[in-house]
Structures are given as structure tokens and as C-alpha cells.
């Protein structure tokens, strides 16, 4: 059912995500006149606070996390906010919560940004208070479980109260403008699609490197590790967007149907196709940083880095490796996708001494939003001693190409789509489960093989075995 919600209920309203992302995003949407004038936002969490106290809390978060150029008058936005304390684990408080939400004129969107252990009790509470009707949609923030079995439990609990058409699972990478641009690049241009296959592509690399370490998320991260925190969701979504067939339309069913086919075609990874690492003390951009074990205060076998050689077993991608790597405490923050094309089938310049490099397309997702296509060109000269060719970049810096356009954070787009009811950029249950299935198999293999993370120095690109993983195939990671 399509409606623009006039109530938004935020669970976890005092949490880190709410402060850093949700409140600033909602403020920015409000400032740009994108929220319905009658949209009311009700926050709920365990702490006891009045509406006025929550508005002060929200103001402090906005002052802390909104970039100065996007801060403006806050009063109008803060007036939309209300707050109801709730112990989500017992049924008692839900009737009061429902009273606070009131009767929506059109509908209610609920955003669950709480520990997954609270999902089940929260759904029960919402049901008991009549907050799961046809005019209610439910948005879930990761982590959605810790493996396929627990993710199914969560999905079953939510499915008991909401049909899939009203469930919105967030993967915030899908809200990033540059991630959406990947679809425009592939499907709004004629020149890439004929080459986008095993006949013309040698391999694909996806890197998500971060300079940050644990960031105080000690308990969560040590239970998750890089593969569950980053690969299971964000990186597999990027892979699916790179590898999927052209959907017939840009809508929720068509796009997600194509992504899930790719995720289901992922080949179980073999022994020797993954490398894990854990950082030790080092330096990043000249700053000394402690090791993971020091930050954690104990020894641990959790990986803070993982590199994987993946394969998509279908006609289009037969024999094309997808090298994935992600890690904390890398030398720089960069998310990028590299499409390495094959060499030309025959070099007419070989007899003239020229060497060739295959073309490469680098799609920079963050922090640089660049698309660079490397092309071979002749080095100017009279060529008396042979022809020299060199790779030159064709470079599009997105911010320059679209100067003046507002750079929005991912949650702005996703929250607006949630309020308006567009599921295209949200993850469907079958996708999440296919993602878990692949990741669970990798983790079982680690366990069976007794694989523990190799150490790497903070500020490096991970253990040397990760370099070897690619170099064995004659591939160099793009840096
Ligand atoms: C989150 C992970 O999902 O994504 C974090 O839990 C990670 O560990 C973050 O730092 C990265 O997001 P972004 O948008 O900064 O690349």
C-alpha cells in the first residue's frame, strides 16, 4: 500500500546512529522542505526523558554532527519531535507508546535501530499495541543476525507481523549516491554493457578500506569481525550491483530480482581463497595507533581484515575472479571498484616495440567520487626508435561534473524512501539470506581449517598473504 507516512517512530532514539545519522538526515530533509508538514517524529529508548528534554538532546546531536554549512534554524524541526521512554523487553509500555504515536492520518513508519535481541520482543510489543496494521511499515537496521539461522529467526519474527512489502532492510551503502551511480554508469550508457562480461573483463576488485579502528564498539565488533560487519552486507551488495543482469525497470522488484540471482550464483569459496588479518600497533598518516588487542584489552581471534577471491558461477562471469578486501586501520579511507579489462587480442604495435596495458575502469565510491577509465595513447614523437604507448586516465570527478548539487548522506535518501514507501534501495529477505549462506560457508571453512588471523601493522594494506592471494594470479591490488 502506497502512502507517505505522517508518523515516524524511532527505536534507539538516543543511540549512536540516531545522533550521528538519523537526526541529522531528518533535519536536512526538513530544511530542504522534503518532509510532509504534518510528519511527526517520535523517539523511543530506555532513558526517561520528556519531549522537551529529547528536543534538547536532538539539538546537541545536530550541533555536534551536522556540517556547519547545513546547520540552519532548528526550531521547526525540533518541534516535530516527541519522546516516549520504553523498556522494549516487556509489553507494559507499548500502549503508552501507541498513545504517544496517536492515530496517523495516512500511516506510520517504524525504524528499529536497536540490538537484534530486542527485535523479537519489540515486534510482540507493537502487535499488542495495535502498531502493526496495514498502514505501518517496518525498517530494520543491521546487524540482522549473526549467521543464516539467527537472521532467519529475526526475519521470521518480523514476517509474523509484517508482509515483505512493508519491511525495509537498510544497507546504508545503497543510499550512497555513488553506489546508485553504478547503475547509471552500467545501464544508462551503451558502451560498457557489451564489454561487461568474461570475454572482456579479466577480474574485478572491490576494496573498502577504513582508517578507523574499534571506535569504542568493542563488544559488537569483536563478536562480528570484518566478514560479518562489512562483507556480508555492503560488499556483497556492491558485488551484486556490479555483476547483475540489466533489470527491466528501476523498481524494487526488478532490481532485487537481479541482485538475488547474483548472490545465489556465488560459488562457495575454496581453501586458500581467503586471508584474514588483525592489526597491531602502527601509524596512520603519521599518527601512532594501538593494536586491536590493546584496544580490546585482551587477545582475540576476530579478523579486522579479510581478503577473498570470489566467483560468480554464471555465463556472464565464468572464470572472472572478484577480489574483495576490507579492513580497519588501513593506510587510507577508500571504497572503490576496479574493473580490469582484458588485453586487446592482438597488438599491431608489438613489432614497433610498444608495450600495452589493458584498460581499467576505477569507480571511486568514497571519499573521492571519481570515475577513471585508463586508455592507451601514443607518446608524442617521431617514433624513429619505435612507437611508445602509455596509459592515460580519462577522469570524471563527480563533484565537478555536478557542482552545485547537494551532497547528501546515505540516510537522507533512505529515510525519505522509507517515509514515502519505495523499497528499491532496501534489501529483500532472499538477498540477506543468500548473503549469509555464502558468508557462513566461509566461516565454517575457517573453523574447520583452524584459520586464525595473521597480524598486520596498522597503516598497512593487510597481511602480506593478501597481496599474495592476488599476485598468485598475476593480479596487483589497485592502490
Ligand atoms: C558499518 C560498519 O556498517 O559501516 C562499520 O558496521 C563501518 O564498522 C561502516 O565503519 C562504514 O560505513 P561508511 O559509510 O563510513 O563506509
Image: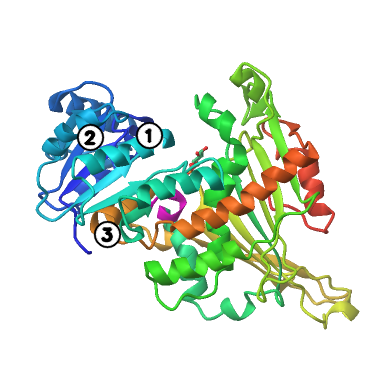
Q: Which residue is disc 1 drawn over?
A: 118
* Mark 3 vs mark 1, CA separation in Å: 24 Å
* Mark 1 vs mark 2, CA separation in Å: 16 Å
Residue numbers of the magenta segment: 169-175
User: Which is closer to the viewer, label 1 or label 2?
Assistant: 1
Residue 174: say if magenta. Answer: yes
Q: Give coordinates of residue 265: x percent, y percent.
A: 63, 65
Residue 203 lies left or right of residue 185; in this view the side is right
For the question of whether residue 377 can be seen, the reply is yes
Label 3: how many Cα within 10 Å (few below 14, some 14–19, many 20+): many
Q: Give coordinates of residue 282: x percent, y percent.
A: 69, 25
Q: Nearer the viewer, residue 355 or 384?
A: 355
* Mark 2 vs mark 3, CA separation in Å: 20 Å
Q: Along the polypeptide, which appears first: circle 1 or circle 2?
A: 2
Residue 191: say if magenta. Answer: no
Which residue: 51% across, 42% down? 150
> Label 1's element?
helix
Q: Give coordinates of residue 42: x percent, y percent.
A: 19, 37
Badge number at residue 421: 3
The quarter in which the N terminus is drawn is: bottom left
> Label 3's element?
loop
Which residue: 73% across, 34% down? 453
* Image vertical order of residue 193 relative to residue 373, above or below: below
Q: Which residue is disc 2 drawn over?
A: 43
Amino acid at each position: 500500500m502506497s502512502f507517505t507516512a505522517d508518523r515516524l517512530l524511532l527505536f534507539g532514539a538516543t543511540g549512536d546512529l540516531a545522533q550521528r545519522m538519523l537526526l541529522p538526515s531528518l533535519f536536512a530533509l526538513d530544511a530542504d522542505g522534503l518532509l510532509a508538514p504534518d510528519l511527526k517524529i517520535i523517539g523511543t529508548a530506555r532513558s526517561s526523558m520528556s519531549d522537551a528534554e529529547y528536543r534538547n538532546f536532538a539539538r546537541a546531536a545536530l550541533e555536534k554532527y551536522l556540517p556547519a554549512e547545513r546547520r540552519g534554524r532548528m526550531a521547526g524541526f525540533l518541534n516535530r519531535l516527541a519522546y516516549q521512554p520504553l523498556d522494549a523487553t516487556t509489553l507494559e509500555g507499548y500502549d503508552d507508546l501507541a498513545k504517544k504515536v496517536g492515530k496517523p492520518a495516512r500511516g506510520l513508519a517504524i525504524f528499529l535501530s536497536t540490538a537484534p535481541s530486542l527485535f523479537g520482543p519489540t515486534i510482540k510489543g507493537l502487535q499488542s499495541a495495535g502498531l502493526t496494521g496495514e498502514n505501518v511499515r517496518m525498517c530494520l537496521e543491521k546487524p540482522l543476525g549473526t549467521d543464516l539461522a539467527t537472521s532467519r529467526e529475526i526475519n521470521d519474527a518480523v514476517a509474523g507481523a509484517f508482509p515483505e512489502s512493508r519491511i525495509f532492510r537498510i544497507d546504508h551503502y545503497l543510499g550512497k549516491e555513488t553506489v546508485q551511480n553504478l547503475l547509471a554508469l552500467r545501464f544508462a550508457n551503451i558502451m560498457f554493457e557489451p564489454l561487461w562480461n568474461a570475454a572482456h573483463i579479466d577480474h574485478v576488485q572491490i576494496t573498502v578500506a577504513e582508517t578507523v579502528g574499534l571506535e569504542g564498539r568493542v563488544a559488537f565488533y569483536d563478536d562480528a569481525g570484518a566478514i560479518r560487519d562489512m562483507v556480508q552486507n555492503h560488499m556483497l551488495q556492491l558485488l551484486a550491483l556490479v555483476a547483475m543482469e540489466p533489470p527491466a525497470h528501476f523498481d524494487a522488484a526488478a532490481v532485487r530480482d537481479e541482485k538475488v540471482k547474483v548472490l545465489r550464483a556465488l560459488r562457495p569459496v575454496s581453501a586458500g581463497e581467503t586471508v584474514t588479518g588483525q592489526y597491531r600497533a602502527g601509524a596512520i598518516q603519521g599518527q601512532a595507533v594501538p593494536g586491536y588487542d590493546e584496544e580490546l584489552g585482551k587477545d582475540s581471534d576476530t579478523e579486522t581484515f579479510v581478503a577473498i577471491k570470489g566467483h560468480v558461477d554464471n555465463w556472464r562471469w565464468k572464470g572472472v575472479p572478484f577480489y574483495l578486501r576490507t579492513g580497519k586501520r588501513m593506510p587510507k579511507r577508500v571504497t572503490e571498484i576496479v574493473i580490469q579489462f582484458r588485453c586487446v587480442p592482438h597488438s599491431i604495435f608489438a613489432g614497433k616495440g610498444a608495450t600495452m596495458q589493458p584498460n581499467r575502469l576505477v569507480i571511486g565510491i568514497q571519499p573521492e567520487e571519481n570515475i577513471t577509465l585508463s586508455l592507451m595513447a601514443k607518446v608524442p614523437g617521431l617514433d624513429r626508435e619505435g612507437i611508445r604507448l602509455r596509459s592515460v586516465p580519462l577522469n570524471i570527478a563527480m563533484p565537478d561534473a555536478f557542482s552545485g548539487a547537494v551532497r547528501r548522506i546515505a540516510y537522507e535518501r533512505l529515510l525519505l524512501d522509507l517515509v514515502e514507501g519505495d523499497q528499491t534501495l532496501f534489501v529483500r529477505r532472499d538477498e540477506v539470506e543468500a548473503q549469509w549462506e555464502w558468508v557462513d560457508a566461509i566461516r565454517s571453512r575457517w573453523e574447520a581449517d583452524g584459520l586464525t588471523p595473521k597480524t598486520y601493522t596498522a597503516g598497512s594494506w593487510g597481511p602480506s598473504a593478501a597481496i599474495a592471494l592476488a599476485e598468485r594470479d598475476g593480479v596487483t591490488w589497485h592502490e
